[in-house]
Image (tube, grey):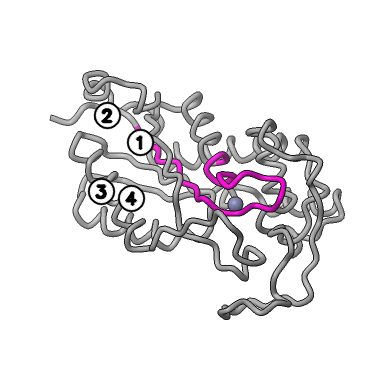
Amino acid sequence: MRIADMTWQEYDDEIGRRIVVLPIGSIDGHGPHLPLSADTIISDHLARQLEERLDVLVLPPLTYGLATDPAASGGRFPGVTNVRAATFTNLVLDVLRASYRHGARRFVLLDSHKVNLGALREAAELFADTAPQARIMAVTWWDVVTEESRNAIAAETGVARHDDHHAAMVETSLVMHAAPHLVREELLADDEIPRRARYFVLPVPQDLRTKTGVVYRAAAASPAIGARLMTEIVTNLVAAVARELGESPQEVLP
Ligand SMILES: [Zn+2]
């Protein structure tokens, strides 16, 4: 059930019984072929799958997040909208605390944007300190993809895992599956970068930037890869949530 579609009375009847899921994304450049909201699309798609399989309430998605480091996203592109870590942490914390006050006790922070993770963990820690009855998990889709299947896809497509990061083959395939109408397939292409570095440097040197924001190979993406990965992600995500938070609705607390 989607909290935004419920009345306050319907919400009041359900909030104490169910797991609450907060889908989280970003507004971030994802190459010439994916929309700025690619991360939110993936998180929201996964939240819908959880909704079909577990007794969850889904909060409205958090569509803003922290901006990716320019070096990790191949440059800084128009549209990238950074929410500062303190703002983001406080926003997540306020949402969690409101749900807890209303009766929720089990929470999933469902993220698809790596850069959010540190702030999400901090929000979860701060929340847990003041919510003694709460159980909370923060999870991303790549947490539940097995090494074997990432390696198998790399072998089949010829795209090495070190060439498959932001807006590249796997992420593009997931959006192709979740929101095919938003993918500009005619613009799908690999990118090249003169140099790679793991450290952070500003301003980003010219030879650490891509032209498109694809880091670095997207051309081999396909809806079939997206469907296959999504099936694995959903199965493993449902199992992880059920394991950590319990499957069945809990008794409403007095
Ligand atoms: Zn992304």
The mark nearer the N terminus, 2 or 1, is 2
Give the residues drawn in magenta, as a range: 19-42
The mark nearer the N terminus, 1 or 3, is 1
Q: Amino acid at mark 4?
A: Val
- Which quarter of the figure has residue 184? top right
Tag 1 residue: 20
Residue 92 - label: 4
- Residue at disc 2, secondary structure: loop
Between marks 1 and 4, how big is the CA–CA gap? Answer: 13 Å
Residue 94 - label: 3
Between marks 2 and 1, how big is the CA–CA gap? Answer: 8 Å
Dot 3, crowdedness within 10 Å: few (<14), some or many (≥20)? some
Asked if disc 4 and disc 2 are in contact, CB closer than 8 Å, the reply is no
Please tell me whether mark 1 or mark 3 is closer to you in this view: 3
Q: Amino acid at mark 1?
A: Val
Tag 2 residue: 15
**52 over 225 or under it: above or below:** above
User: Which residue is more in the foreground, 173 or 241?
Assistant: 173
CB of residue at label 3: within 8 Å of ligand 1?
no
- Indicate whether residue 239 is drawn in magenta: no
Between marks 4 and 2, how big is the CA–CA gap? Answer: 17 Å
Asked if disc 4 and disc 3 are in contact, CB closer than 8 Å, the reply is yes
Q: Amino acid at mark 2?
A: Ile
Asked if disc 2 and disc 1 are in contact, CB closer than 8 Å, the reply is yes
- Residue at disc 1, secondary structure: strand
Q: Is residue 3 left or right of residue 219?
A: left
